Amino acid sequence: MNQVGTMKRTETMLLNVGPSHPSTHGVLRVLVDLDGELINSADPDIGYLHRGIEKMCEYRTYHKCLPLMNRIDYLAGEVNNFGFCLAVEKLLGVEIPKRAQYIRVLIVELTRIASHLFWLGTHGHDLGAMTPLFYAFRERETIMDLCEMVSGARMFPLYFRIGGLAADLPEGFMPAAWEFVKSFPKCWKDYDTLLTQNIIWKHRTMGVGTMSAGDALDWGWSGPMARGSGVDWDLRRDNPYSSYDEFEFEVPLGNSQGDTYSRYLVRMAEMLQSNRIVKQALEKIAKTEPGDIKVADPRVSLPPKEMVYSDIASLINHFKLIQEGITPPKGEVYQCIEAPKGEMGFYIVSDGGPQPLRVKVRTPSFVVLGSLDKLCRGRLLSDMIAMIGTMDIVLADVDR
Amino acid sequence: MNKAVALLEEKFPDEVVEVVEFRGDTTIEVKPERIVDICTALKDGHDTGFKYLSMIAGMDYSPASPRFGVVYALYSHKHHDRITLKARLADDQAPAIDSVAKVWSTANWHEREIYDMMGIRFKGHPDLRRILMPSDWVGHPQRKDYPLKGM
């Protein structure tokens, strides 16, 4: 960096990066003010994927919000629903059965691995390491297949419901999941071999995009981004929800440099921890009663299908829940979860009616992208690609 | 009592409007005029230490008046404590509140989004312009009187 720093100052140039560039992870446009190859300032221009999800939620019942939520962070579809369901359940004051909680943890941790694998593949690819992408997508495909087993869909399973799950785990799911859990650490070794000690990889990521722990909090960083800077904080451990306090796992912290390499180490280690949680979840699910997957509260859960066909009261209940929706009491809650990309929060205000008065989604990608300018200043243009990659942003998550 | 509530009632007794406990969440409504002082005190206070701003949400409570509001979700890593801070803005025609971007850097983008979506002005914000909508857009899409479709 020093040689570059002593170069003679020249005229600055405004460079337009994106909106459709392979390294912008969707449709992100960055206006970069360059002095030679050095970045004076970087101004992200977002909103290309703004779909008005928060606004749309105000015009539909709580259950009808779920398909929208799936599409916020589309690389971790079910995680968004997890947070939204937890927030509405908090508003309602209900707690779902243990079996359903464990299954949710299982699906969400599998999704976390899938999301991290996608990050690993694309981040490596952005920086010129093409091979990890093929390995990472191999295992991601297995997770997609597991998602398909539970709900029929791969990217957007839509498997969670307010008050529980859409259905119990299908036959054949448990053996398939066990097979994945057992084989994953060996597959993980493949990525580790390709990158962790790779000298080019180290040159491209070490010392790039450094952030101190204090600055990370000031800029609202959470999840793996904050942990890469040494902030020892994980919502699953520190503010447990959905029975996370019953699981054993470690919170990896990287190498304390707060750079891109440190965040790489954090996410790599997190995948193994998630695999550990999945294993425990499978053991716990096996000990619970099959079929116990939703709250027994007729104001929240649909009655069993056979009852709808044979009992008039259940039929009316079903009809009213679908047509009118659930009506949480007047009040407001903020519920956040540890999403693969950081803290994902839902602020929901209810006026007592069947539609939310306001749904505010706090997405991790939006917040970290806000600090791109701070990270980039004085760095080389090619480092910006590493920084966008390390942020693990999804533009649908940024724009909502 | 929640430490944040205790701090605010001691230092800003005239500013606290209402404290609501609901489903384990503590929501403190304050008057908007001294929001920067309040946020700074909550951030730097020894017993509070809300160094982390989760989000800021803009609110449109219409047809109620005051119509607009701003909601801050704060977190303290020191105590693993979480509070929601709320302020209702008096002016329904030109709602405005002081910016807290100097207290937490992350507030910058949150406030830009609220300005874009709700039309609430943040006084003293370093760079208050639209963020999600194009710069020449007319209107503020997340206001309740903005149509959902048929543009």
Image (cartoon, rainbow, N blue to C red):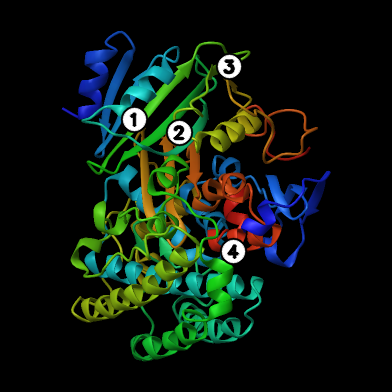
User: Cα distance, mark 2 to mark 3?
Assistant: 22 Å
Chain of the residue under label 3: B
Secondary-structure class at tag 2: loop
Amino acid found under the numbered disc labelled 3: Pro
The amino acid pointed to by label 1 is: Lys
Could you say where residue A319 lies in the image, as x and y percent from the top left?
A: 45, 54
> Eyeballing the image, is A33 above or below B140?
below
Q: Secondary structure at mark 4?
A: helix
Report crowding for label 4: few under 14, some 14 to 19, many 20 or more residues within 10 A (C-alpha): many
Distance CA(mark 3)–CA(mark 1): 25 Å
Marks 4/1: CA–CA distance: 31 Å
- Report the Cα–Cα distance between label 4 and label 3: 38 Å
Numbered mark located on residue B43 in the image:
1
Is label 2 in contact with label 1 (beta carbons under 8 Å)? yes
Q: Earlier in the sequence, mark 2 or mark 1?
A: 1
Q: Determine which residue is flagged by label 4.
A: A389
The residue that appears at 60% across and 35% down in the rendered structure is B113
Residue indicated by mark 3: B95
| Image disc number at residue B104 | 2
Q: Chain of mark 1?
A: B
